[in-house]
Amino acid sequence: MQHLFHKGTDETKPTLLLLHGTGGDEHSLISLAKEIDATANILSVRGNVLENGMPRFFRRLAEGVFDIEDLIFRTQELQSFLATAAEEYGFDRTRIVAIGYSNGANIAASLLFHFEDALAGAILHHPMVPRRGIELPALPNIPVFIGAGTNDPMCTAQESEDLESLLSKAGAHVTTAWFNYGHQLTMPEVEAARAWYRQSF
Ligand code: MLT
């Protein structure tokens, strides 16, 4: 997968896996990652799917309606890529914390829904429930931050609440922070994510 890797200055920190929103790329979330932790490794990946020229991490049939077969295939592809990247760059595969926005948050959530060892934690900005009707793997005490907008037309409040509940039932330690905005990522949300990260890692 197309990506970039920046080696961090503090080896005790996890590796931050950056997953952009629709139309973004591997450069989109670098400044966000620096706000969260300027000293950690950064692995930033570009989604392999194109929708009208816009990179995404999996296909959708319509806005908010996912192509589940492709979602499963792309989730597996990303999971395999993480193992390869850890080998290549020499970071600890068991200490990856995803930071995803929108479509990137959805593939991060999908990693959690399909693999028990994919992520050591996740910051999900404006995620949806990636897939319904499946049993999640055990996610004992995996810290997850969900940033949600009370007026988000794409990721409704119900989606955020359902996601929190599904992840919590699997054992994850979920913190949901609500903001009185829509789908956009705002500075108060980034600050809340940073405070959560500092407590969690
Ligand atoms: C998705 O397709 O993952 C969601 O609709 C969010 C998005 O792409 O922005």
Image (cartoon, rainbow, N blue to C red):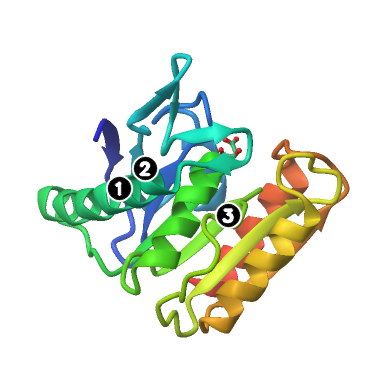
Q: Secondary structure at mark 1?
A: helix
Quickly name the residue at label 1: 73
Quarter containing the N terminus: top left
Residue 47 in sight from this viewpoint: yes
Mark nearer the viewer, 1 or 3: 1
Q: Residue at x 37, y 42 (%)?
A: 70
* Residue 10 sits above or below residue 28 on the image: below
Q: Secondary structure at mark 3?
A: strand
Q: Quadrant of residue 96?
A: bottom left
Type of amino acid at the residue the image marks with label 1: Phe
Quickly name the residue at label 3: 124
Circles 3 and 2 in contact, beta carbons < 8 Å = no
Would residue 118 be found to the left or right of residue 187 on screen? left
Q: Residue at x 88, y 48 (%)?
A: 180
Mark nearer the viewer, 3 or 2: 2
Would residue 75 be found to the left or right of residue 24 on screen? left
Circles 2 and 1 in contact, beta carbons < 8 Å = yes
Residue at the top extreme of this rendering: 53
Image quadrant, ligand 1: top right
* Residue 3 sits above or below residue 135 on the image: above
Q: Quadrant of residue 117?
A: bottom left
Q: Quadrant of residue 53?
A: top left
Q: Residue at x 30, y 48 (%)?
A: 73
Q: Secondary structure at mark 2?
A: helix
Quickly name the residue at label 2: 70
Type of amino acid at the residue the image marks with label 3: Leu
Number of marks in the rendered image: 3
Tell me where residue 176 appears, x and y as whole percent. Answer: 71, 66
